[in-house]
Image (cartoon, rainbow, N blue to C red):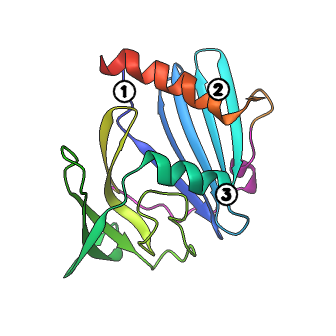
């Protein structure tokens, strides 16, 4: 039932990540690093909803929902999908929260890409990282890079999505994931 692939598209200082499982489920995030907005879109069956959060709300949620790690920066690196990456390890104080290995690059050119993300102290686009959300620990690894041009329309919310308060959207996502995890 869970998606096994995430697609990230970027142009300028915006990017969109999307995970989906056929036509049954999709979850997307549009991050505008200049205007500091985060648009969350959720589709489950025929239900299509979205919410837009401004910077203050994003930072409040980020700091309440995600533990703040201490970073152990290494001299190690690697080439991942053609980008030179640095390696850091995120160490969490919370019991039961395992450390996370991060590989990130500054060769993509997005300024402050992680401002809305638990790893906001890392200045580089994540190409390998781990994240725990909705009771699920996820590991993301970049597998390919396609330099094809990106149409600005991918950063727009489709007209068949309904705007809702973020709390409602988050509650519905938590309920959907809890049925999968339990």
Q: Which residue is mark 3?
A: 56
2 or 3: tag closer to the N-terminus: 3
Which label sits in the foreground, 2 or 1?
A: 2
Element at label 1: loop
Q: Against 109, is 144 above or below? A: above
1 or 3: tag closer to the N-terminus: 1
Element at label 3: helix
2 or 1: tag closer to the N-terminus: 1
For the record, the magenta segment spans 143-157
Q: In this view of the protein, which residue sits in the foreground, 77 or 53?
A: 53
Q: Tell me the quadrant of the picture where the N terminus can be found.
A: top left
Residue 169 shows in the view: yes
Residue drawn at (53%, 66%) of the image = 147
Q: Tell me the quadrant of the picture where the C terminus can be found.
A: top left
Residue drawn at (55%, 58%) of the image = 116
Is 12 situated left or right of 17 in this image? right
Q: Marks 2 and 1, how far apart in space?
A: 21 Å
Residue 169: % across, % down: 62, 29
Q: Which residue is mark 2?
A: 168
Q: Are marks 2 and 3 in contact (CB under 8 Å)?
A: no
Q: Which residue is mark 1?
A: 2
Residue drawn at (70%, 69%) of the image = 34
Q: Residues within 10 Å of mark 3 (few under 14, many from 20)?
A: few
Residue 166: % across, % down: 66, 35
Is 28 situated left or right of 176 in this image? right
Q: Marks 2 and 3, how far apart in space?
A: 18 Å
Element at label 2: helix
């Amino acid at each position: 039932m869970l998606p096994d692939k995430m697609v990230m598209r970027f142009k300028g200082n915006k990017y969109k990540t999307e995970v989906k499982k056929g036509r049954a489920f999709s979850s997307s995030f549009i991050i505008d690093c200049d205007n500091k907005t985060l648009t969350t879109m959720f589709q489950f069956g025929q239900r299509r909803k979205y919410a837009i959060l401004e910077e203050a709300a994003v930072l409040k949620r980020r700091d309440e929902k995600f533990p703040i790690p201490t970073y152990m920066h290494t001299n190690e690196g690697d080439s991942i999908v053609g980008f030179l990456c640095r390696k850091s390890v995120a160490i969490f104080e919370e019991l039961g929260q395992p450390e996370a290995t991060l590989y990130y690059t500054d060769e993509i050119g997005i300024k402050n890409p992680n401002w809305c993300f638990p790893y906001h102290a890392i200045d580089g686009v994540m190409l390998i990282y781990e994240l725990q959300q909705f009771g699920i620990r996820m590991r993301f690894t970049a597998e390919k890079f396609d330099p094809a041009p990106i149409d600005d329309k991918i950063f727009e919310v489709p007209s068949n999505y309904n705007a809702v308060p973020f709390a409602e959207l988050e509650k519905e996502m938590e309920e959907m994931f809890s049925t999968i995890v339990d």
